[in-house]
Amino acid sequence: MDGSVRLEEVVMRFGDFTAIDKTSLEIGSGEFFSFLGPSGCGKTTLLNMIGGFLTPSEGRVSIGGEPMAGVSVNRRPTAMIFQNLALFPLMTVFENIEFGLEVRGVDRRTRRATAERLLSLVALEGVGSRRVTELSGGQKQRVAIARALAVEPRVLLLDEPLSALDLKLRQHMRSELKAIQRKTGITFIYITHDQGEALTMSDRVAVMSAGRLQQVADPMTLYRQPATGFVAAFVGENNRIEARVIDRLGERVRLDAGTLGELEGRVGEEASLGGGAEVALYVRPEQLRPVAAGTSGDASMGGSTLVAEVESVSFEGAWLMVQARLPGSGEALRVQLGSEVSRSFADALVPGEAITLGYDPAETVVLPRDDGPRVDEATGEVVEAADV
Amino acid sequence: MFRHLAARFGGPLSAAILALLGIWLILMVTLPQLQMIDYSLRPNLLPDQRGGPEDGWTLANYATLFANDIHRAIFFKTLWSSVLVTLLTLAVSYPLAWYLAKVATPRQAALCILLLIIPFWINEIMRTYSWFIILAFRGPLNELLLMLGLIDRPIRFLSGDGGVMVGMVYAYILFMVFPLYNAIESLDDNQVRAARDLGAGTLRTHRRIVIPHAKPGIATGCIMTFMLAAGSYAVPALLGSPGSRWFTQIIYNWFFEGGNWNQGAAYAFLLLVLCIGFMSLVMKVFKVGLGDIAK
């Protein structure tokens, strides 16, 4: 039995509330797979169903090809790392790690040897006889990993395990988790609302919203070819411009963006967007480049230009972040300018000035227009996908 | 300590609080107890003999217990039966407390606690008498068992210690359930989930995770139940048979029927020593301090 996980048309309802809507998914053995989504999107529910803490209202969960219906938590080949770690505070580090082995009737000496080996795997030698309450946050984190690995799970479930750590430690633990996963070859299923974690560690990421999978893809595809408006807005930053399709040639579409004039963009091959379709064009801040005013755009860039009014400029070291506003539609536009812009150009960017920007249509994404994802007014974070 | 109080309530009020506490502790607790110790160490004399040549401190009253086989047997039976009552109450209360703290929804738990408390609005004598009725030779429990065909003749529940046990478990269950409930309730659910996730079954999860966590609550409940059971008078008086006398009944008899306060005081102190001894033992076994229990 391998560490693959398969969800078939899984539904989870709590009373009238549908937490997970008909979801099917396959996770390969040895894969580092992440569920990414805002809080309340159902990702923890999915994890709990795989771990056996919840029984799906409908559908099937199987691990390594074996159906898990009726298999209780303590008999599943999974181990969970809890958000609050849930280390046993009355036990020592050794006792924590050995707990799962003790349950399995492994003798004392073998248990201790395994615990020592795991402690060295997580770079924590020598703390075995300490109480877990005496450890620092990062050390507790490692003990939790060691404790879960001790039972040799085929699938390790991680429920936002890094969220309690400070930024620096979190970034360090990312690479460490990835290294442990590579070393052990265990399937990691990772839950997070932090796209940085999901993108840096995962082989594949499932973006979730409102109980549904929005897109399942490798991190780069997710970033470059988002499949839905939610993914486009949730993963990385994106500028959204509403338009209507004029005509289409292969992947390339010409768009009528109202007062912004004619723009070009790229659609996925499978998208069935014909002339007249209402769409949204997504251009990332770093894809916008300043071009000389008055030109109808650099021919090499495909000819699309936008003129915006600068609202504010912030210098972030490696780049300049320009906050601008499009005339007419009044929509905000964020532009990230790299080191290629000259000092004099940067100095000329003062609020109220017009800036002309071009982009390569091949780097953009055109998606059917939905009502747009719901954005939290206070934080500016995407909360929930619009119904497509 | 006074400074803390003074900072919060002001000098005069704090002084008043401490004075009240002191008066209570000294006048109502310490002095009467000292008086009783004095009684217990003197022979029982007629009023005109007091202060006479026969009056003086002696351990004779304490020695009585060890010379009297019947009293000694009842003393140790009271100890043993109280331990048994405590264990039975624990066995009944633990699943109940677990259910209330971790399984039931808040509504169910509230309803359950209400149902547990309502009987305690009735006084102890009445409640105990109702057990007397239930357990009677021709009572409803025997009728029911006969009807179900589980027994072919009525059982004399009240002739041995059985009736006393049942009555006491019932009378003191709340003193066990609430400390347990408080202790279990404070356990993080993820602890239980983690234990299950690592492969532990129900029994092991309780033995290794829940019970160690609930230890202070278990100790508190056991101590309270034991103290109440060992010091109980009404339940053994009502539900006991002549063959199942409780040590408290002997003490009562010395005081109010024998009129020998000196002997009664000595017996009462022996019971107190027994209780304190048991409490220390439980605290040692469970490795809890007074601070844990006061929580």
Image (spheres, coloured by chain):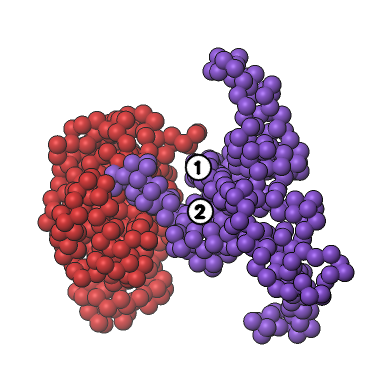
Chain colours: A red, B purple
Nearest the camera: B22 or A255?
Answer: B22
* Amino acid type shown at disc 2: Ile
Residue depicted at x 31% and y 44%: B200
**Helix, strand, or loop for circle 1?**
helix
Q: Work out which quarter of the rendered image holds the N terminus of chain B and state it.
A: bottom right
> How far is mark 2 from mark 1, CA to CA?
11 Å
Residue depicted at x 65% and y 18%: B143
Name which of mark 2 and mark 1 comes first in the sequence: 1
Q: Position of residue A207 (x, y in %)?
A: 30, 47
Label 2 environment density (alpha carbons within 10 Å; few <14, some 14–19, many ≥20): many
Residue farthest right in this picture: B48
Q: Is residue A302 visible?
A: no
Q: Position of residue B23 (x, y in %)?
A: 77, 75
Numbered mark located on residue B218 in the image:
2
- Respond whether the residues carrying marks 2 and 1 are from the same subunit: yes
Q: Position of residue A294 (x, y in %)?
A: 27, 66
Image-quadrant location for residue B29: bottom right
- Residue located beneath label 1 in the image: B91
